[in-house]
Amino acid sequence: MKALRARRSATSFILSLLLLPAGWSWALPLQESDSSTRQSPSEITVPNRPVAPLFKGEQGEQSSEIQFTPSSRIVALKLHVEDPNGYFLPNIRRENFAVYEDGVRQNNVSVEVQHAPVTVALLLELGGRYHELNKALAMHVSQIGRQALEVIGPQDRIAIFKYDANLTSLADFNQGHEGLVKTFDDLAVPPASEANLYDALLETLNRMRGITGRKAIILVSTGVDTFSKASYEEVLKAARETAIPIYAIGLGRMMQVEANLYGPAAPFAHVDWNGAENRLETLARSSGGRAYAPQSEVEVPAIYDDIMENLRTRYVITYMSSNPSTSGPPRKIRVELIDPKTGQPLKFRDSTGKPVTARVFVQETYSPNAA
């Protein structure tokens, strides 16, 4: 009898579904997720990451963006949140963000994660005074340049430049992907020349000034400059002023291995590779970028992933300003990460339970007049 009642119930359920009006839908009730997979709003567990940054030294101040729409008084903040090693901190909930404008806590704050398209100038060193080093340089630059194409998506734009004594454009921002690949097929061992890094970087920075959106220069270079008209101080000042992040992939350590094969009598044996590497680091830090010093090409894919996460990914916070005015003096902005129940600072732990410190990069003011 119980089996018969069960069959009748199942039949009635199926018939009721067939008789639903057109356009109706149904769904099974959502099941509660396992408590071990739920994230507490008072504490965030971050993914397991390396214990040290991939980049060398310290990075510079990270850029953020603030947009204000006068007609709606909507403010949009695009900011970076990272751990002490420079890795993006994911999984932060909307209720963990507290936004203050001129000291007033803002209501109805929404938060999304943005993976923005990027515009990249890939600047490659392809020239120098010594033929034997130029052969090794061409091999490394070709391989590292090709790997850059693997992280460029369909919505991104990339231009490729090389420099020796002069800057030469190999591919512009509108080049198709197949044409970009062919660019590296056509690279040959460069003849002996000067390596005018500072002139080339200064010109590339100037070309990037008028480009809107998320943009950067990826510099693949030893950091050695032989005969530039521009000084190191001039290009350093331009890097600070333009605020276009420079991600420098230094070739000095690879080239030093090549140079050591020829012994102390070779003319390039006494190049100051360490000094060149340090200057690249300072240039990158001053621009808000990062400097890398790989020992081999095996490290390069992880470097590109680090660059793209740092360049693309932002938290986007939007809210309607509590200030009724659509103009006036600059307004101060502060963003805190909090436990919504207590108002205390939000706690972060890594996968082993070790406390992690979060860094929030957001500009301190915005001007509604400028919008």
Image (spheres, grey):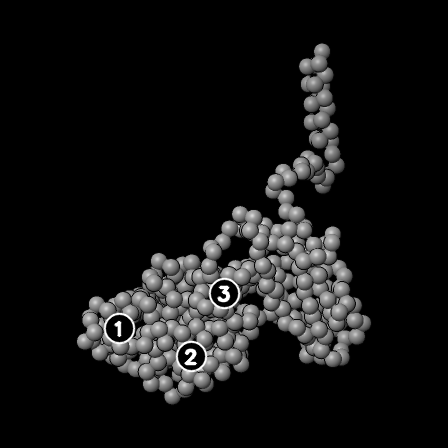
Horizontal side, residue 32 vs residue 56: left or right: right
Q: Residue at x 55, y 60 (%)?
A: 83
N-terminal label among 2 and 3:
3
Residue 134 has which mark? Answer: 1
Task: Indicate the secondary structure of the residue bearing disc 3.
Answer: loop
Where's residue 17, x and y in %?
A: 71, 31
Quarter assignment of residue 364: bottom right
Q: In whole angstroms, how far apart are the C-alphas of marks 1 and 2?
A: 20 Å
Give, as a three-letter code, the residue at label 3: Asp
Q: Residues within 10 Å of mark 3 (few under 14, many from 20)?
A: some
Q: Nearer the viewer, residue 118 or 104?
A: 104
Locate residue 221, reporting x and y percent: 36, 72
For image coordinates 63% across by 44% down, the residue present is 38
Give the Cα distance between marks 2 and 3. Answer: 21 Å
Q: Are marks 3 and 1 in contact (CB under 8 Å)?
A: no
User: Which element is circle 1 on?
Assistant: helix
Q: Which mark is residue 156?
A: 3
Percent position (x, y) of residue 23?
A: 72, 41
Circle 2 — which element? helix
**Quadrant in the picture for residue 151:** bottom left
Q: Which mark is residue 201?
A: 2
Compared across the picture, whether 74 is left or right of 301 comes to right
